[in-house]
Image (cartoon, helix red, strand yellow):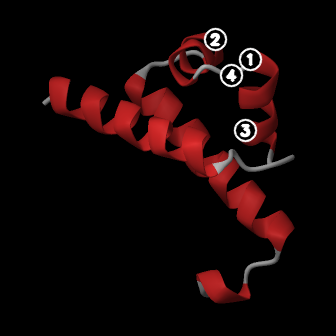
Amino acid sequence: MTIETLTPEEDREQFGAQLRKRLLRLNLTTTELADELGVTVRAVQGYLRGEYLPGPKVRRRLERLFTDIERTQQ
């Protein structure tokens, strides 16, 4: 299955699964992530459950945050 064939629901679920893996690998809580992104814990929980995707602004913050954390852990 390629990304082009994913339904919106599968895309949300896949994003949530990948986000959960990164949180576990980086040892971050949903509260810590929410604080760093400037969103509510409930929003982060929704991303993790695949209920919805973050908007472009939050996605950029998320990528910057993970990049910065991964750099400091190396």
Q: Which mark is residue 48?
A: 3
Q: CA distance from mark 2 to mark 1?
A: 6 Å
Chain-order first, disc 4 or disc 2 = 2
* Camera-nearest residue between 45 and 21: 45
The residue that mark 1 highlights is 41
Q: CA distance from mark 4 to mark 2?
A: 9 Å
Name the mark nearer the viewer: 4 or 3: 4
Chain-order first, disc 4 or disc 3 = 4
The residue that mark 4 highlights is 39
CB-based contact (under 8 Å), mark 2 and mark 1: yes
Q: For this view, does 48 lie left or right of residue 27?
A: right
Q: CA distance from mark 2 to mark 3?
A: 13 Å
Q: Which mark is residue 74?
A: none
Report helix, strand or loop for mark 4: loop
Chain-order first, disc 2 or disc 3 = 2
Report helix, strand or loop for mark 3: helix
Chain-order first, disc 2 or disc 1 = 2
The residue that mark 2 highlights is 31
